[in-house]
């Protein structure tokens, strides 16, 4: 149920789901409340006054009984259970001007794959299908071999010619055919990627056509996702994830490629990701009480390096100039041959890659977003160490990887961290006092700052006028001490004091950190600018921006535009596709057309090596500014900053 | 060089290769010389007189210097090195009448596959071919993935579209392509049994198109043969064999099928035959100094049970009524998955079976003999425990398995043994004295009698009038004691006395043994008579008889006709195909047409279950006679026996 929260004295009202945390509601509304402890309730700074309605709240030690009775509550400890009116106390009050920047909400959410739409478009047509058939039992007068009996029976019943059969099925064929007196259900692979004929993959006694399952897998450098698909009903039954066990051998693809060059290194990485998939898969199947024998196939998407590692292919040449992957279109492979604990009949169908740094995860995202069949000029962007960008529409697609560096994953930032529990993700800064309002993942004491937190922090520092467009702190902010101070690495902003953190030290952002973030965002911006220029188009020609990846789902678009990471387009042109890689893999299982079309889409994507592309370096240098050296690229931000002055 | 040997007093001349053993030359000529020790030279009975020419001979202890100087030699210890005239001493002399039966020689020999003929017919066209290509090295301006570079390069150079690639090749692709600066030789599989596209199977640096090898394998119940094929030149480089290690688990297919029903039994049998193939293959490759990596694929022929066991498929239903094999047309399978120690790219292509007891070995023989494309009505016969017969021509083929029993493999015969060293294979009997002339394999002291020896012995006993057409010994042969005597199992003939044998006991043939041989030959004869009757044809309509199998190569056709095993046709209508199973497998490697046609040929072969076929039992009963109850079926034998009387 939706509840309305009105913040006084601004009279800003926001709608939130019942049960929403009040501090989060304030952030959503763009209302600043001081809050230093990330939402754990220990700093006591986020006190507000409940004027109307009800909050479920705990008093804790930081509010006296008297204050409690007057209606004071800690915002971070309060949940909205009715329409409420909340007054922000004077110490947290913001100048009204600051509120200008809050216009478009972050309400865009990744939408799961729409099976109904697929069905409407005639695209719901899994390449793997189950067919029940009642065969004539063998007799002395008719004792052809079991396999021919099965092929003939299926052929007659379903008008299928020329069936092929997976070798390993033969090992149980005789038994299965006799278990229910020659009534059997065959799983058929119509994909023709492995064979020119429909291929009999599995056989079960009796009629099991109503039960048919597949797995979609996304191998991320950091996280492995597995989705359990019901091909009989077209439902996604559930999903599970875990960290890629390869993380023990290095955080990023380059470190892992280097590790493969040690003796036994490739085998170790291959086995660790297979172990992760096994573990996640078994957990997921157990949760749904499904034996692994009922899985007919696996679809997979991953970046190029992850694909090479999982397939046991030496990824050396991905890292060395001229950056050639060994394979972009992998043939189907028996999952057992890669160490997956599934029946022998299970093959893996992998989404094609485009190049060493534009992988199957991006192609899967392009498939899932459907941009390859739209007429609108679209920018598809996946922000990460190798931020990947795709520009185009149904007629052409250009793509590139930007070596953005690991800043958005917390790398190279002193207090950067991955988006896990305790990471500061939401930030608001009072420009008058420099006091922050922060919210951590899981609302516990902060441990560091994650990528989306860094974007939000940088945008706030910039919009509050605390840092200048060149990324340096203003010299005249004496009033903001002790939040702004000198350190060994230049000036820094103290986001949380040691006593409010989990790590027992101040969490800060220095000019060095800011420099790293600017390089990362500059590389991304320069990337898509270069692609646009390469095809003779301008920023304004973009009609749509699709944000892919887990990171994309958590990003505050307005802040990302403010720092010059995303283009300054009307906010309703932005869409999140969520984990496009996993969704693309799922689509391959749900639609034979997708399974057969994915290679065409990958082949359609023209890869640009940015380092080799004229103009990229100029674009990059020009982008090392907040939001950009050329203000006209960011009209709405420029206007807002103007208003604020 | 051919030498002429003339035997006095008969004036029979035979041509033999220089170096031929004189006793063997006598057998070839149909000249009887007493010889009891199998050719080892210890009985001294085979002495002859050299009248003209030269023999290389050793004197030994059994000839005095005086005898030696007179020109006496032991036939079994003598080799023909010039044209010679030999006089048989009176004690070995045969009545001239006895010589009537020697008319057609056994000079027919299995001919190896004729590559030149294949080439003439446009059939020499291996499905696997090597293609050299110089690829453009990768550069930043052209950094497509290695696989696409390879596929494009091959496609342009050889006008090939739409190549597929074996997954495991990818694991070495990057390295191999760079080893000789992007000059590579690809092994392509054009067979389309695994993929609808030509499939890249292997890749080597540089130009290796002149080196291309494959293996053909024949898994017999008893023996495993491996042939090494040079696909670049079309030569059979060599072959090697060993006993099937499954022999430890039982001599015949039924015993082995029963063994698979024990826990772990199937796995044990699978592993033991794989171990045999590995051992024979490695030995063969070592002999030819070839690394196993240069093998591109394996072709295989075997009977239905052997195929099931090697492929790890439960053979239970082969033995149980209604005798359905699980699979007759096996899909190609990765050799590694069956435990063969070959590179991952090696797949096994197996010849199709027809039914549980007419297997791929027979289909391979039909392919090798070419009978499926001839117009002549042909009887193809493979004598063994499950004697298989095929009748037909290019328009139709009928086949059946006769449960002949193991007699021809020495089973169920007191002194029966396999055709190994010391087995009596050649026999001649002096009808007057009942004295035998025997020759063993390797010419060592006899240990027992092999299948072809049994046929020769039985025919000799019959033609010498020692046994009657009903298989019983004549009652009035007192003169032949001690060669004929009573035993616990009725009368028996003593072929070798204990002192002349390796086993230290008399080697005999009893009436019980004879009965077993008659059942075996009766089942075979009844089998092809039933098939002929089934299609409305008669014995006389047969235009050709092809004898397959190792046994078939060693059989004395005339003796086999005499006992009623083979039909009484002019002797020049008989052909040996040798190991048709191995030859058929080899053909599959040499000819894409054969690889693709073999299934059509197997499907063309209509299987008859003799036990279910009306008339078979009557035919069987009628055939339990020497040569047959209906004399008109065996006119030449009847005539000869008539003459002799």
Image (tube, coloured by chain):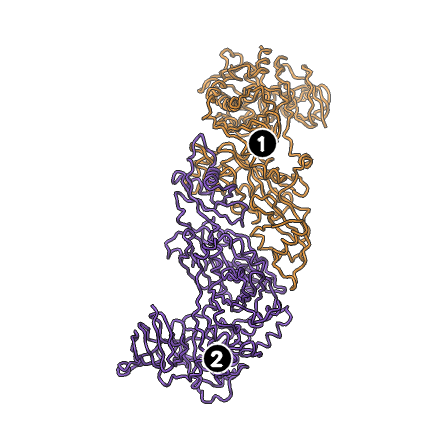
Chain colours: A orange, B purple
Q: Is residue B73 visible?
A: yes
Q: Is residue B191 above or below residue B110?
A: above
The image quarter containing residue A100 is top right
Badge 2 and badge 1 in a common chain: no
Q: What residue is drawn where x is 51% and y is 32%?
A: A358
Label 2 lies in what chain? B
Report how far apart the C-alphas of labels 2 and 1 lie in the structure. 83 Å
Measured along the vertical axis of the image, is residue A439 above or below residue B389?
above
B17 and A638: which is toward the camera: B17
Mark 2–mark 1 contact, CB under 8 Å?
A: no
Q: Is residue B356 above or below residue B174?
A: below
Mark 1, chain letter?
Answer: A
Residue A587 image point, x, y percent: 61, 37
- Residue at the spot of label 2: B509
Q: Is residue B43 left or right of residue A508?
A: left
Q: Is residue B189 left or right of residue B211?
A: right
Number of the label disc, if any, that sits on residue A366: 1
Badge 1 crowding class, 10 Å Cα cut-off, few under 14, some 14 to 19, many 20 or more, is: many
Query: Picture coordinates of residue A599 (x, y %)?
Result: 55, 37
Q: Is there any visible trace of residue B43 in the rendered image?
A: no
* Picture coordinates of residue B83, whole percent (x, y): 32, 74
Q: Secondary structure at mark 1?
A: helix
- State the count of labels: 2
């Amino acid at each position: 149920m939706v509840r309305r929260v009105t913040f006084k004295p601004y009279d800003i009202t926001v709608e939130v789901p019942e049960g929403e945390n009040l501090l989060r509601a304030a952030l959503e509304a763009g209302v600043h409340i001081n809050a230093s402890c990330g939402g754990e309730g220990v700093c006591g700074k986020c006190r507000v006054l409940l004027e109307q309605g009800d909050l479920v709240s705990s008093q804790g030690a930081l509010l006296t009984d008297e204050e409690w009775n007057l209606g004071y509550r800690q915002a971070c400890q309060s949940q909205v259970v009715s329409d409420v009116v909340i007054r922000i106390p004077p110490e947290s009050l913001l100048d009204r001007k600051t509120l200008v920047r809050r216009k478009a909400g972050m309400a865009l959410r990744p939408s799961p794959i729409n099976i109904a739409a697929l069905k409407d478009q005639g695209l719901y047509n899994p390449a793997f299908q189950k067919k029940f058939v009642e065969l004539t039992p063998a007799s002395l007068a008719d004792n052809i071999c079991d396999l021919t009996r099965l092929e003939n029976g299926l052929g007659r019943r379903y008008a299928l010619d020329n069936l092929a059969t997976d070798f390993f099925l033969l090992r149980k064929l005789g038994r299965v055919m006799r278990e229910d007196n020659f009534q059997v259900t065959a799983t058929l692979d119509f994909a023709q990627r492995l064979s020119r004929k429909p291929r009999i993959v599995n056989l079960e006694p009796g009629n099991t056509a109503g039960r048919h399952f597949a797995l979609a897998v996304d191998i991320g450098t950091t996280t492995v996702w597995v989705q359990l698909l019901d091909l009989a009903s077209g439902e996604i039954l559930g999903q599970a994830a875990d960290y890629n066990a390869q993380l023990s051998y290095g955080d990023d693809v380059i470190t892992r490629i280097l590790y493969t060059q040690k003796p036994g290194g490739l085998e170790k990485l291959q086995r660790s990701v297979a172990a992760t998939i096994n573990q996640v898969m078994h957990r997921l199947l157990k949760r749904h009480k499904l034996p692994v024998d009922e899985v007919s196939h696996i679809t997979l998407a991953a970046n190029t390096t992850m694909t090479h590692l999982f397939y046991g292919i030496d990824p050396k040449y991905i890292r060395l100039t001229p950056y050639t992957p060994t394979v972009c279109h992998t043939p189907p492979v028996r999952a057992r041959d890669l160490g997956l604990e599934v029946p022998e009949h299970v093959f893996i169908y992998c989404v094609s890659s485009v190049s060493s740094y534009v992988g199957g995860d991006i192609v899967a995202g392009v498939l899932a977003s459907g941009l390859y069949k739209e007429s609108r000029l679209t920018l598809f962007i996946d922000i990460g160490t190798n931020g990947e960008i795709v520009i185009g529409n149904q007629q052409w697609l250009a793509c590139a990887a930007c070596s953005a560096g690991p800043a958005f994953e917390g790398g190279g930032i002193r207090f950067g961290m991955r988006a896990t529990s305790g990471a500061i993700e939401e930030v608001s800064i009072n420009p008058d006092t420099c006091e922050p309002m922060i919210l951590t993942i899981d609302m516990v004491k902060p441990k560091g700052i994650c990528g989306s937190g860094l974007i939000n922090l940088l945008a706030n520092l910039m919009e509050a006028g605390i840092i200048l467009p060149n990324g340096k702190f203003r010299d005249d902010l004496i009033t903001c001490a002790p939040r702004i101070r000198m350190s060994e690495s230049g000036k820094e902003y103290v986001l949380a004091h040691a006593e409010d953190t989990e790590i027992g030290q101040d969490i800060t952002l220095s000019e060095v950190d800011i420099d790293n973030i600017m390089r990362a965002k500059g590389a991304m911006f320069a990337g898509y600018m270069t692609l646009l220029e390469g095809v003779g188009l301008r920023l304004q020609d973009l009609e749509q921006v699709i944000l892919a990846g887990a990171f994309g789902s958590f990003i505050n678009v307005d802040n990302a535009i403010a720092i010059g990471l995303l283009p300054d387009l009307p906010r309703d042109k932005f869409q999140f596709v969520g984990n496009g890689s996993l969704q693309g893999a799922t689509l391959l299982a749900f639609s034979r057309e997708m399974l057969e079309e994915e290679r065409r889409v990958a082949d359609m994507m023209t890869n640009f090596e940015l380092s080799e592309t004229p103009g990229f370096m100029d674009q990059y240098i020009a982008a090392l500014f907040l939001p950009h050296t050329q203000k006209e690229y960011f009209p709405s931000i420029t206007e807002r900053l103007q208003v604020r002055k």
